[in-house]
Each structure stands twice: as C-alpha cells, then as structure tokens.
Image (cartoon, grey):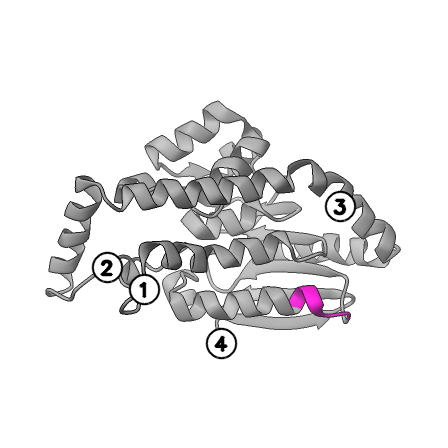
C-alpha cells in the first residue's frame, strides 16, 4: 500500500510508504494516492489532513526507473492528464492540509507539498524542481504554486537551474512555513493539525476557502498551461536524446 492511513484526534495522517525509493511514485502508486486523496475529501471521520512520508524523505516525485515508460497505447496527453489528477485531487481535498516535509522533496513530490495549506519542514530538507535536467518542465502546478510563495525570480531559478535548495533557504524564501529538527517534525506537524481540528470545522473550512478562492483558479490554469508546455517538450531533440539514453541504460527496453 503506497498511501497509509491513520485517523487520530480529528486528523487523518496520510503517509507515503515506499521508503526504499524515498517515496517516489510510479503509475500504480499514483493511482493509490489519487484514491486516498479523494477518500479524504469524502470522509466525515476527520477534519484535517496531514501528509507525510515514511523513511528518510517526503517524496521524490516520479520514480526515475519509470520515467519514459507508460502503458501501451497511452498518448502523451492522456498520460499527463492522468498524472495531474493527483494534484487536482489535493487542490480539491476540501479540508485543511499540512505537509510534514523532510529529506528529499523533489519534482512532483515537492509540488504535492507546495499545494498544502501549511508546510512544516525538517532541517534536513532538500527541495528541488529538477525537471529541466530531463529536458522537461513542471506539470503539477509548480510554476504557479512556487511563484505564489516565493515570487517569480526565485521560482525561475528553481525551474531553470533544477538545483536543490536546503531547508534554511526554503524557510528564508517562504517556501516552507515552520522549521524544526527531524526528530521534532512529526510531533510538531501533528500538534498543529490537531489544534486546527479542535476549532469549529465549518469556520475553519470557511477560512480556508476565503484564501483558496484567491489563488485556486491560478493553480488550475497553471496545470493546463504546464500540460501544453510538457507536450511540446516531449517533441524536442533534447528530450528524445535523453529518453534514448535511459532506454539504453535499461538494456534496450522500449520507452514512450
């Protein structure tokens, strides 16, 4: 099970559970995550969602071993739109969400953290949106999510360099909201979630919606733009050369 579920004190703890690959996701894991996010929206058993990762990291996005691979007959467009269902499910989760981020938060996994209402980070966090190194771009709303938090220039640096930034930089820039030691992370994030859960739920949701209405349409528009941009990049010589290099490394296994 990629996404573990635990309900405690009005909080649903969703834990990504592939620590051996730093909680990277393939197609099956993505489907399980989408199902868990939609379940969290529909459930009345809890009031707040806490998203975290088992092991050393939060989430490193799409498993690099699965990059360039997909089901036979699946078009670039359908592949991208299917993958974007996860970020759309998080956008529409309907409950306050806190992300407890540690270790590596990379690519699509980093974007799952960015869409949370609040981000608590451990001091060992390493954050990156490295798609440019694969001749691609973000496609989970990251261009807008990051810009809304840290402004256009710093977002351009993340997207154009693909480099990691450390926890101190992420905190100083405003990419994460709270910074604690790795040992304190889970307790701090849960404490915050439980505190919100104790408040009148309708008032909490109203507060969330008042703010979300200012930016949620921008996230949706970014997801659409990023899909179109990614489709264009799939046709570039750079992407195809890197795809063929990955295929060779896998012993000639066809990629898409």
Lower sequence index among marks 2 and 1: 1
Q: Nearer the viewer, residue 103 or 202?
A: 202
Numbered mark located on residue 25 in the image: none
Mark 2, secondary structure of its residue: loop
Q: Which numbered disc, 2 or 1, marks the residue closer to the eye? A: 1
Lower sequence index among marks 3 and 1: 1
Q: Mark 4 and 1 residues: CB-CB less than 8 Å, in contact?
A: no
Residue under label 4:
1
Q: As drawn, is 16 to the left or to the right of 156?
A: right
Mark 1, secondary structure of its residue: loop
Q: Which residue is located at x 80 percent, y 44 percent?
A: 207
Mark 3, secondary structure of its residue: helix
Q: Mark 2 and 1 residues: CB-CB less than 8 Å, in contact?
A: yes
Q: Residues within 10 Å of mark 2 (few under 14, many from 20)?
A: some
Q: How far apart are the alpha carbons under marks 3 and 1?
A: 36 Å
Please provide percent x and percent y for residue 141: 50, 43
Residue under label 3:
209
Residue under label 2:
256
Please provide percent x and percent y for residue 238: 19, 40
Q: Nearer the viewer, residue 252 or 216?
A: 216
> Which stretch is magenta?
40-44
Lower sequence index among marks 4 and 1: 4
Lower sequence index among marks 2 and 3: 3
- Quadrant of residue 135 in the image? top left
Residue under label 1:
74
Q: Mark 4 and 2 residues: CB-CB less than 8 Å, in contact?
A: no
Q: Is residue 115 visible?
A: yes
């Amino acid at each position: 099970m990629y996404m573990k579920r635990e309900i405690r004190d009005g909080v649903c703890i969703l834990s990504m559970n592939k620590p051996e690959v730093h909680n990277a996701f393939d197609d099956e894991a993505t489907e399980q995550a989408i199902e868990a996010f939609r379940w969290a929206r529909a459930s009345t058993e809890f009031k707040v969602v806490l998203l975290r990762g088992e092991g050393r990291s939060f989430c490193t996005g799409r498993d690099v071993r699965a990059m360039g691979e997909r089901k036979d007959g699946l078009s670039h467009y359908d592949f991208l739109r299917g993958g974007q269902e996860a970020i759309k499910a998080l956008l529409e989760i309907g409950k306050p969400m806190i992300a407890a981020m540690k270790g590596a938060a990379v690519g699509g996994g980093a974007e799952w953290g960015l869409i949370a209402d609040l981000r608590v980070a451990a001091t060992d966090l390493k954050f990156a949106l490295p798609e440019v190194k694969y001749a691609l771009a973000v496609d989970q709303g990251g261009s807008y999510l990051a810009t809304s938090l840290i402004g256009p220039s710093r977002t351009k640096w993340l997207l154009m360099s693909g480099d990691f930034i450390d926890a101190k930089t992420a905190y100083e820039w405003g990419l994460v909201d709270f910074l604690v030691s790795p040992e304190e992370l889970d307790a701090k994030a849960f404490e915050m979630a439980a505190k919100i859960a104790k408040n009148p739920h309708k008032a909490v949701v109203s507060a969330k919606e008042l703010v979300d209405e200012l930016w949620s349409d921008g996230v949706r528009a970014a997801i659409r733009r990023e899909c179109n941009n990614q489709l264009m990049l799939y046709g570039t010589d750079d992407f195809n050369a890197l795809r063929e290099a990955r295929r060779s490394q896998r012993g000639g296994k066809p990629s898409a």
